[in-house]
Image (tube, rainbow, N blue to C red):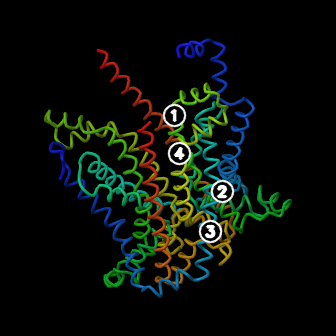
Amino acid sequence: MSRNRVIPGFGLSLGYATLYTSLIVFIPLAALAASGISLGAETFWAVVSHPQAVASYQLSFGASLVAALINLIFGLLVAWVLVRYTFPGKRIADALVDLPFALPTAVAGIALTALYGRNGWFGQYLEGWWGFKVAYAPAGIVVALTLIGLPFVVRTVQPVLEGLERELEEAAASLGANRWQTFRRVLLPALVPALLTGFALSFARAVGEYGSVVFISGNMPYRTEITPLLIYSKLEQYDYAGASALGVMLLVFSFVLLLAINGLQYWSLRRQGGG
Amino acid sequence: MSGVVSSLSTPGNVVVSRRAVTEAAWLRGLLIALALAFLGVFLVVPLVLVFQEAFSKGWQAYLAALTEPDAWHAVKLTLIAAGLAVPLNVVFGVAAAWSLTKFHFRGKQVLITLIDLPFAVSPVIAGLIYVLVFGSRGWLGPWLEEHNLSIIYAVPGIVLATVFVTFPFVARELIPLMQEQGVSQEEAALTLGASGWQTFRRVTLPSIKWGLLYGIILCNARAMGEFGAVSVVSGHIRGKTNTLPLHVEILYNEYQFAAAFAVASLLALLAVVTLVAKSFLEFKHQRDRERAARAAARQEVS
């Protein structure tokens, strides 16, 4: 099958990569699928349509959507500022964007909880002055998910923005477009695939997130219980069947989103290549 | 047409067109301020708070929290998990990138999708799948029990969960790099009589070294900081199956806030060091590329 006859190691490298991937990723995930299927349609449906589960989907998806939208807008802003402007501390700001990739989620979780709690630096004003409860409320979950998904939009938009030719904007300006029109009609369309990819990545990450949310959410069933946490508590009660059914739901969702992201990236590459 | 071009090149018009392709100073300032405020609220303030809380009871309490036996044990277990997961994923990453970029074969896309999957899967699911395979009621549970082996609620489970969540890091970093590089250099080395291993070490490795290091650093940060997946398989046995992030959780839930933040500050420090190392590697990589591009340009000229 290999077209390349000179370079050695095809059998060894592919064989090892396939074996390792099967053992670590494929077989265990297949175990989850098998465990979900073995429940039978009726039991499966009973678990995944239970009101507590439905409430958890609404919260998980809703909060993740809001967080991904915040990151979409501010991610574009941060990428724009980092690519187009110069200001003191720019390199530090640029490096800092990746902090959520490097900072353990548990650390982010306790820091945010302390920050937005009733006596926290932010919480005392938000709660004390405006009565806006963040910690132990859905708003806290949004804050945690925003932090976790922050780098994605910035890092997908940044390279595209850097690669855009300035001539296009100059052409638009010389044809009489004002800055806002140029941004909306020339720049934004070119950024759409990258923006969508970043949005989808940050959404996918947020839906599965556990570590940072458990601390700030308060974990009240029907109120502030996200789906990953529900799976976790089912496992703690040795309810493997329930955990598997919900796990399958979340896995299918991740898989669909992953396919969508790959499609988006393909589209974005073709657009960049095409001009 | 020529009139338009020549009028654009007069100095007065250039100024007009430059103003049209950037924003007014007040708007630039406002956008920069907004972006920095966003980064400040979501990243800087939480990071500062971790260190402030860690030292809220003074240096001695800080050191006591870090030198306590359970904390010490958590440090060791975290080092073991990362020390096993990172090399395993480095070997895999190099093998996967080699097969995916130097050869053509059917089913490539399937392998790439499987490699990406751990990024998309919730950490809780990462733990759950191993419980389903190795747990007492899992596929291999009865067999493991018969042979007196335990994986779940023990160190091997923690290592497995860590391997899973850090699985794509190195491969993901290397695949685009090696793709871009092509095969011509390796082919040249091989036809000149180099062995496969020599070719890899002398030709491939030097051009991917920064990317490889970059992948290792990110892989390590995630391995040491993973919480959800490890939490599911650990069983939270104090002084036995607690990694640093799990130890933070236990202390926090026991209302020992200063101690929790002290241990958390170690992990936050690791994150900061990771970011610094990452920026440094990006700089190195960039410089090497520019050098290579200049050398190539010089060759073309001569």
User: Residues under labels 2 and 3: Cα distance?
Assistant: 25 Å
Foreground of the two, B209 or B58: B209
| Circle nearer the N terminus (1, 4) | 4
Mark number, residue B221: none
Q: Are marks 3 and 4 on the same chain?
A: yes
Q: Residues within 10 Å of mark 3 (few under 14, many from 20)?
A: many
Residue B98's x, y, as percent? 28, 48
User: Residues under labels 1 and 4: Cα distance?
Assistant: 15 Å
Chain under disc 2: B
Residue that badge 3 annotates? A214
Looking at the rendered structure, the kind of residue marked 1 is Leu
Does residue A102 show up? no
| Circle nearer the N terminus (1, 3) | 1
Residue that badge 2 annotates? B62
Q: Are marks 2 and 4 on the same chain?
A: no
Q: Nearer the viewer, mark 2 or mark 3?
A: 3
- Residue A168 in which image quadrant: top right
- Residue A97 in which image quadrant: top right
The quarter of the image holding the C terminus of chain A is: top left
Vertical side of A118 occupied by B147: above or below: below
Q: Nearer the viewer, mark 3 or mark 4?
A: 4
User: Residues under labels 3 and 4: Cα distance?
Assistant: 27 Å
Mark number, residue A155: 4
User: Residues under labels 1 and 2: Cα distance?
Assistant: 50 Å
User: Residues under labels 2 and 4: Cα distance?
Assistant: 36 Å
SS at badge 2: helix
Vertical side of A90 occupied by B107: above or below: below
